[in-house]
Image (cartoon, rainbow, N blue to C red):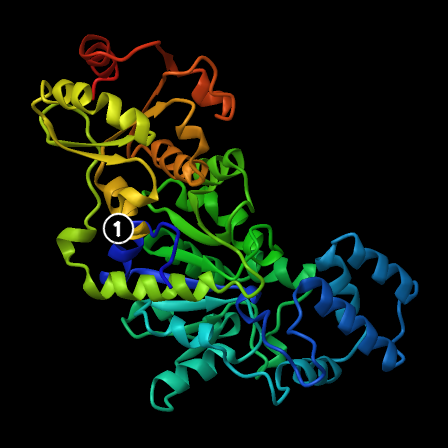
Amino acid sequence: MKFKGTIPPEIIQAIKSNRCILFVGSGLSAKVARTNGKKLPLWGAFLNELLDYAKSKNAIFWNGPEEIEDTIKKGNYLLAAQELQECISLGEFSEFLNSIFRDRKVIPTTTHKNVFKIPFRAILTTNYDSLLEGAYALTHEGQVPVKFTQEDLKTISSPLRNEDFFLFKIHGDIDRPESIVLGSRSYNQILFRTPEYLHFLETLFTTHTVLFVGFSGNDIDMDFVIDRLSTIYSRTLNKHYILLPNNKFNLTEKRRLLLDKRLEVIDYEADSNHSEVDNFFDALNELQTNSSEQDIKPKPRKRNFDFKSDIFIISSKNFHDKYENVITKTLSKFKHIESQMWFIGLDSIKDYEDLNRNIERSDNVVMFFDSEVLKMKEIESLFELITLREIDEKIKIIPIAIVSDPIRLPVFIRRRMIFMEELNEENLTNILKSYKI
């Protein structure tokens, strides 16, 4: 199946230039089942299992296990983790990790293997398991990847100094239990007391494009990196991306992520198996394999009239049939407009990739709102896509309403809306000139 979301051309360009880093979170392994039938745990479940294990070892808790259980329920995972880490020995913690991640049924999934179809510069992961290492061996004739943890940075030069692919276990590796980062103290120590680690992350985020996959959007692991580094890489031209289920964030939240943290959301349609994640990697592989340098080169931002422009038009079919001639004649007066592309529903395009490609080519998007266009099932997701591109100064949106009150539209776009009863060449020409397209 085809991926139904949008893959920004900047990601493809970064892959082709060996500047794309994949950052893998625990969600990528969350559907792997163990012998007992349980899936590999995310943060809350992991700590609850560790609490049960500590109780089975007759661990001595500072004020009883009930308070740790309450702390986990409140979502204060790092505090709970620190308490649990101090209750058991390193050997016992290693035994616990092995009981989960070395279960005989814990093997790489198709998703893990699909990752290695794409020539990422490197892969970073917060996961303790060895599923990525196993997938690498399965897809590379039994070879094992070059692998580092934060402990290695104290004694070696940065892995970024050469061009070889590497796997970086950012919070430690099950093969080296002493390297595991778990509690709040461990998190703070590696960032604030290990300058080599901080410098490595700073360099990586300011010189590469990072793609986050397997995160929920509000993970402790992701926040740990993004919140502390975004003030550094936001001063550069770099932007990073996160693949998330649709409706995880609303448009305002996506806007703040883009403006404040230079993190753009790539939405996908969620189902129980998150099968669109595999479709995403398939589409990413196909695009980076088939695209030429010319296809993926981002268009420069336009600052004057000395350029050729593409315009993308969104409307209902009824509006298209009624006003196509008026709009075509009007656009012909603008000599710098090189082409126009019209979207009147999914039936008007070949596939989502064709839609995405047309939007990427466009400098201006004119949206004609009537009573019919608001009934198009894909209009909301399409509107989100072009809105985020306008926030990033990639396109300009010109909203025109042929209805008195398109109430389903966001407030910020209604404030800019141009209302009219009828469209003709004269008023459309004046509108386009006022927007300086």
| Front in this rendered view, residue 154 or 148 | 148
Task: Name the residue: 49% across, 39% down.
Answer: 254
Examine the image and state in which quarter residue 338 appears: top left
Circle count: 1
Q: Is residue 330 left or right of residue 377?
A: left
Vertical relation: 42 (above or below) 413: below
Locate the C terminus by quadrant: top left
Vertical relation: 407 (above or below) 272: above
Q: Is residue 414 left or right of residue 396?
A: right
Locate the N terminus by quadrant: bottom left
Examine the image and state in which quarter residue 430 appears: top left
| Front in this rendered view, residue 255 or 372 | 372
- Label 1: which secondary element: loop
Examine the image and state in which quarter residue 427 appears: top left
- The residue singled out by tag 1 in the image is 350
Q: Is residue 288 left or right of residue 159?
A: left
* Three-letter code for the amino acid on which mark 1 is drawn: Lys
Residue 155 shows in this picture? no
Task: Name the residue: 15% across, 58% down.
Answer: 292
Vertical relation: 383 (above or below) 120: above
User: How far across and down, in percent of the image, does residue 71 sit?
Assistant: 81, 56
Vertical relation: 185 (above or below) 136: above
Task: Name the residue: 72% across, 79% down.
Answer: 93
Residue 9 shows in this picture? yes
User: How far across and down, in percent of the image, does residue 135 sit?
Assistant: 44, 81
Task: Name the residue: 14% across, 22% down.
Answer: 331
